[in-house]
Amino acid sequence: MTKAEIVNEVAKATGIEKGTVQTVVEGFMESVKDSVSKGNPVYLRGFGSFIIKHRAQKTARNITKRTTLTIPAHDIPAFKPAKTFVNSVK
């Protein structure tokens, strides 16, 4: 499902204009992005959590050139679904 499809579904379900719904959806996404980029997780009860996961430094191999690389430690954004969300998908 794309962002446009989400906007259409919400507009249809609520009766609100698509332009308004799109502004709200984009505002929500920007708020989540800003919060997570500052290191603050976003918890949505019954849906899931947007969190930061830390990846430790590791050594990787390039088998075609027979060399090793060191991948530095870094943080990545992640989504962890709530139990109710996982159970509804099963």
Image (cartoon, rainbow, N blue to C red):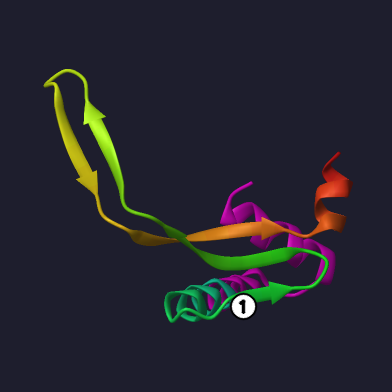
Residue 15 vs residue 31: left or right? right
Residue 29 vs residue 13: left or right? left
Badge 1 amino acid: Val
Query: Can you identify the residue that label 1 sits on?
Result: 24
Q: Main secondary structure of the magenta part?
A: helix
Q: Nearer the viewer, residue 9 or 54?
A: 54
At 82% across and 71% down in the image, what residue appears? 14
Quick one: SS at disc 1? helix
Q: Position of residue 88 (x, y in %)?
A: 88, 48
At 47% across and 78% down in the image, what residue appears? 39
State which region is magenta. 1-27
Q: Position of residue 78 (x, y in %)?
A: 54, 58
Q: Position of residue 38 (x, y in %)?
A: 43, 81
- Count how many numbered circles sit on residues in the image: 1
Q: In the rendered view, would you say 55 is above or below 16?
A: above
At 14% across and 21% down in the image, what residue appears? 66
For mark 1, does the 10 Å Cα neighbourhood hold few (<14), some (14 to 19), or many (20 or more) residues?
few
At 26% across and 55% down in the image, what residue appears? 72
Q: In the rendered view, would you say 56 is above or below 20?
A: above
Q: In the rendered view, would you say 75 is above or below 44?
A: above
Residue 42 vs residue 67: left or right? right
Q: In the rendered view, would you say 31 is above or below 18?
A: below
